[in-house]
Amino acid sequence: MKTRYKATNTIVISNDLVEAYYNLTPVEQKLIYTFISVIRSEKGNFEIVDPKKKYTLHVDEYADIMCIAPETAYQGMLNALESLCKSEIHIKTGGQMVRISWVSAIEYDPDERTLALCWSPDIIPFISELTGQFTTMKLGTVAKFRSFNSMRLYGLLKKDKFKGDKARRWVTEVTVAEFKNILNLKEAYAFKHLKSNVIERAVAEINRTCQEELTVETQYIQPGKKVTKVNFEVKWNESVP
């Protein structure tokens, strides 16, 4: 089967989308990234996305990228795609927070074992024809993550790669309040749980999964009684361009 969907594909999304507020399951996020990955070609050119155009994905293509059994993948993919129809993104644009959708329509064919979507017109400016202020990630890297939080944090770290100095190091700074918003966690979510259940687990998975690409350490900023900010100190691997 000749396919456009490959682990070597590059996901390109606007920095605003990287910092947007939403919550998905790992399968939903991976499915979104898989569909996004074909919008920019291997030559680096963006496809002009028509909101009426259907993007079709075969279960075998997805299963091959994610290293999962195609026999059991289809129902999980279908459930994720149906859920994406109801999912919303809170994203900052033009100085205002707006609420938009990922997709406008989906189709599925159990006999052919294919899924298809049409992108919402509102999401298209954040995934296509980007000329600046965007973040790139390899689909094959994202496919290895098991946690949605790890994928979101990885995107935030990659967003700041341009800050890297000659030693290929940089710091991604995120306030505790903003980090909760990005992951769609309630304001009352206790910091001790954020630290142990979210931050430490995500950092551990990133370091384990991406050790050939980057490593990350955390520093908690506590000017008073409470930690108000987290600094993620990133070191880019010298062997990776």
Image: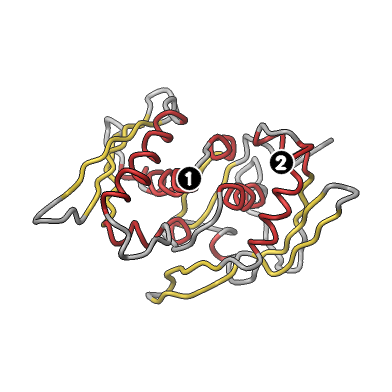
Q: Can residue 45 be seen in this view?
A: no
- How far, Cα to Cα, is label 2 from label 1? 17 Å
Image quadrant where residue 211 sits: top left
- Give left or right: position of 172 versus 119: left
Q: What residue type is labelled 2?
A: Tyr
From this view, report whether residue 125 is shown above or below residue 154. Answer: below
Give whichever of discs 2 and 1 has the lower sequence position.
Answer: 2
On the image, the x and y values in percent for residue 113 come to 84, 47
On the image, the x and y values in percent for residue 100 come to 55, 72
Q: Do the residues labelled 2 and 1 touch (CB within 8 Å)?
A: no
On the image, the x and y values in percent for residue 240 come to 44, 27
Q: Which amino acid does label 1 sit on?
A: Met
Look at the numbered disc 1 and give the secondary structure of its residue: helix
Q: Can residue 43 be seen in this view?
A: yes
Between 131 and 10, the one nearer to me in the picture? 10
From this view, report whether residue 215 is shown above or below residue 132. Answer: above
The circle on residue 151 is: 1
Residue at screen point 28% across, 35% down: 217
Graded by Cα atoms within 10 Å as few (under 14), some (14 to 19) or many (20 or more), the crowding at tag 1 reads many
Look at the numbered disc 2 and give the secondary structure of its residue: helix
The circle on residue 62 is: 2
Image quadrant where residue 120 sits: bottom right
Residue at screen point 40% across, 59% down: 182
- Give left or right: position of 157 versus 85: left
Image quadrant where residue 19 sits: bottom left
Graded by Cα atoms within 10 Å as few (under 14), some (14 to 19) or many (20 or more), the crowding at tag 2 reads many
- Check the image and name the residue furthest to the top: 239
Residue at screen point 64% across, 41% down: 43
- Give left or right: position of 85 versus 19: right
